[in-house]
Image: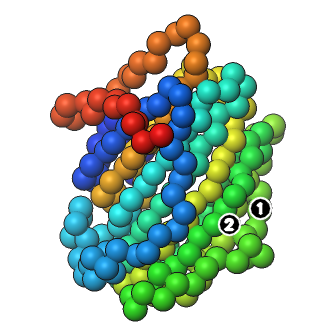
Amino acid sequence: MMKLSLLCLFKILSLTILTSLLTMAQPKEWGSPDPAHLEMKTPMVDKNADAEVLLWEVYINDSSRYVTTYTHFLRIKIFTDRGKETQSRIDIPYLDINSVSEIAGRTIKPDGSVVELRKESIFDREIVKYQKLKVRAKSFAMPGIETGSIIEYRWREARPESPYYVKLELQREIPVQTVRYYLKPFADTYPMRTITFTLQGNRTPFAENTQR
């Protein structure tokens, strides 16, 4: 399945992009599970989906001239046994010039009980090596996952890249209910602007984040 880029919606219910020139919202700590999410029996975006992303948040700190950091948070609902199989193992791929850290995760069972991901369950492995190109992955298995569960995990990736171009991914391998980007742009003389590709419908505008 082809991935679509900036502001292109495919099996996504809602998208929000918030920007702040002064400060940037930080990822929330684990909160109490939403009873409505635990009680969900069928997907909202695609009725045939085996699993669905309830929320995907990305916090981008693009204020440095040399490094851009991406902090991801994912909340996924498991609906079927096949969904349990496909989502039980998580791989976070990254180029070897980048770094991935601060990985955390947990499984919320249908009864509301929580099983935390242990640090010793996270492994680093090489998945692609071609000439000078090397791709690695942080891999782990979500603990205690079962049909009806909600899994949550997060990580931070640092990329030594130019801040003049940031690609925002909006699509995953399973349907997504809500995508929310928080962006702290590079504070330079150049204004921030967006370019859309294969966009269907109206573009979602940037909005300033007032939550300091």
Crowd tier of the residue under label 2, counting other residues whose Cα lies within 10 Å: few below 14, some 14–19, many 20 or above: some
- List x then y, in percent, for residue 135: 72, 48
**Numbered mark located on residue 139 in the image:** 2
**Could you tell me the amino acid type at mark 1?**
Arg
Query: Which of the 4 image quarters holds residue 92?
Result: bottom right
Crowd tier of the residue under label 1, counting other residues whose Cα lies within 10 Å: few below 14, some 14–19, many 20 or above: few
- List x then y, in percent, for residue 1: 40, 51
Which coloring applies here? Answer: rainbow
136 or 2: nearer the viewer: 136
The residue indicated by pointer 1 is 125
In this view, 4 is above or below 74? above
Q: Secondary structure at mark 2?
A: strand
Question: Which residue of the protein is positioned furthest toward the top in this rendering?
Answer: 189
Q: Given contact means CB atoms under 8 Å apart, are the residues at marks 2 and 1 in contact? A: yes
Residue drawn at the location 81% of the way across and 37% of the way down: 132
Residue drawn at the location 77% of the way across and 39% of the way down: 97
Query: Which of the 4 image quarters holds residue 205?
Result: top left
- List x then y, in percent, for residue 87: 49, 72
